[in-house]
Image (spheres, rainbow, N blue to C red):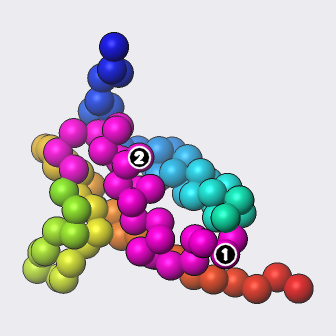
Amino acid sequence: MPTAYHKFFSRNDATDLGQALLRLADHYPLTLRTERDFFSAVTAYLAGRVPNLGREVAGKEGVVDFRIGGNNPVLIELAVALSRID
């Protein structure tokens, strides 16, 4: 039986998502390097957790990667920065 959707996307959910993406990037360091590389994984994560997910939604200020609809919508912009640790 599938689990029910969450009713909201909290700051803790965003933190958990970020940490999961960092672990994924550590496991595949040569494959996951750009926003495009992570986009499918983030889409799958969000689609499995929240209803009313919009991808690449245009607004007054440009295009946002994800919009979670509802009474209090959440906008999520995915950004990837490579850093070098010596």
Q: Is residue 21 above or below residue 57?
A: above
Q: Which residue is mark 1?
A: 30
At x 21%, y 78%, the residue is 63
Which residue is at 71% across, 59% downward? 27
Pick out the residue farthest to the front: 31
- Disc 2 on helix, strand or loop? helix
Residue type highlighted by circle 2:
Tyr
Examine the rendering and report whether any part of residue 8 can be seen.
no
Locate the C terminus and report the quarter of the image it occupies: bottom right
**Residue at the spot of label 2:** 45
Magenta part of the protein: which range?
A: 29-53
The stretch drawn in magenta includes residue 56: no
Image spot of residue 58 (x, y percent): 13, 74
User: For the residue labelled by badge 1, is the local secondary structure a helix, a strand or a loop?
Assistant: loop
Is residue 46 visible from the viewing direction of this image? Answer: yes
Quadrant of the rendering where the N terminus is positioned: top left
Find residue 16 and report its horizontal and vertical position in percent: 55, 47
- Left or right: residue 14 compared with residue 69: right
Q: Which of the 4 image quarters holds residue 64?
A: bottom left
Nearer to us: label 2 or label 1: 1
How many neighbours does mark 1 have within 10 angstroms: few (below 14), some (14-19), or many (20 or more)? few
What distance separates the C-alpha of mark 2 from that of mark 1? 22 Å
Looking at the image, which residue is at 47% across and 71% down?
37
Q: Is residue 47 magenta?
A: yes
Earlier sequence position, callout 2 versus callout 1: 1
The residue located at (18%, 82%) in the rendering is 61
Q: Is residue 78 left or right of residue 52?
A: right
Residue 12 place in picture, x, y as percent: 51, 45
